[in-house]
Amino acid sequence: MASMPELVSESNVGQFLDSFDAFMTDCDGVLWSGDTVLNNANIVINKLISLGKQVFLLTNNSTKSRDDYVEKCVKLGFNVTKENIVSSAYVLALHLQQLGFEKKVYMMGTTGLAKELDAVGVKHVGLGPDPLFGKTFEMIDLVVLDPEVAAVVVAFDPYFCLPKILRAASYVKSVPGCLFLASNTDESFPFKGSNLTYPGTGCFVRSVECAVGHAAQVMGKPEPHMFEVLRKRHHIKPQRTIMVGDRCNTDILLGTKCGLHTLLVLTGVHKLDDVQKMVDDPSLNDQVPQYYLPSLGDLLEFLK
Ligand SMILES: [Mg+2]
């Protein structure tokens, strides 16, 4: 039986700050909204870094490289480097590196993912448009599979199309032991003030899974992989790590699955009313955070 989260306050902040060495946080809805910093979140992050905490900014977004993210963070006043940024594209590349993968990846994705694969020396094909040629079913005689490919990676790809599903599914089904990985399964991109639904990576992943007949291994939140790859790389301990987020079904769930401390901030998707529903429904208890704060910036008064 879960109970409502504890507000971080004067009386428990000492215990709260002493409970973790590694601070992992979601970005959008916690640190910023679009290009606007949320209530002193940058000052809090800089302060935590200066206090010697290991800070990791986590994002499921696979379209930007970590260098792109550092640029955005620095512009917004976060004193972070590449080592502080953890994207699903980076985790994917690190996973392949940790497996000692030496063959070629067939990728659906953008230059952000390609850069991360390049950085760990993993060869790849598939970047950019793949136009339909011949009549629809003539492709069966015209498409030639690359014999070096032994992994398929599905991430956000604006050129997603039938020939790409055909290639991805064919590799997974015909290459013995072919890896089948996805950056994340986010359903859509939130755009405030528009009535359009912008499809997320999950739509691409599900299409390939449908053709293949089994699920891809997902790297992004809420799957534990994001933490596992970080744990190996930085030797961090679950019981000394906190996961911070604004969404219970991704950020907080990741934390619970990995045995981390969890903190919900109320500057994004989920509010206390939502948490109450998760407390009341036993099937959602693993999405209930341990602590909450109105905003990350509210930590500032305790850090001086
Ligand atoms: Mg968020």
Image (cartoon, helix red, strand yellow):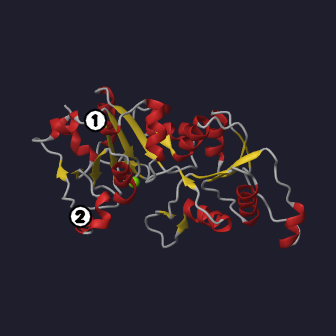
Q: Position of residue 32 (x, y in %)?
A: 38, 49
* Quadrant of the drawing holding the C terminus: top left
Q: Secondary structure at mark 1?
A: loop
Q: Which amino acid type is marked by label 1?
A: Phe
**Residue 163 at what x, y percent from top left?**
77, 63
Specify few, some or many for label 2: CA neighbours under 10 Å numbering under 14, 14-19, or 20 or more.
many
Viewer-side residue, 146 vs 28: 146
In the image, is residue 131 above or below residue 21? below
Tell whether 35 sits left or right of 119: left
Mark 2 CB within 8 Å of ligand 1: no
Q: Is residue 140 left or right of residue 1?
A: right
Image position of 42 (left or right of 139)? left
Q: Are marks 1 and 2 in contact (CB under 8 Å)?
A: no
Residue at left offset 74%, top offset 66% = 162
Residue at image position (44%, 39%) is 73
The secondary structure type at the circle numbered 2 is: helix
Residue 55 is situated, as x and y percent measured from the top left of the image, at 37, 35
Q: Please, which residue is most extreme toward the left here? A: 11
| Placement of the N terminus among the 4 image quadrants | bottom left
The answer to whether any part of residue 81 appears in the image is: no
Residue sitting at x 73%, y 40%: 103
Give the spatial CA distance, label 1 vs label 2.
24 Å
Vertical placement of residue 136 versus 150, above or below: below
Q: Quadrant of residue 208?
A: bottom right
Looking at the rendered structure, the kind of residue marked 2 is: Val
Disc with the residue nearer the chain's start (1 vs 2): 1
Disc 2 marks which residue? 279
One can see residue 147 in this view: yes
Q: Quadrant of residue 202?
A: bottom right
Image quarter for ligand 1 equals bottom left
- Identify the residue under disc 1: 20
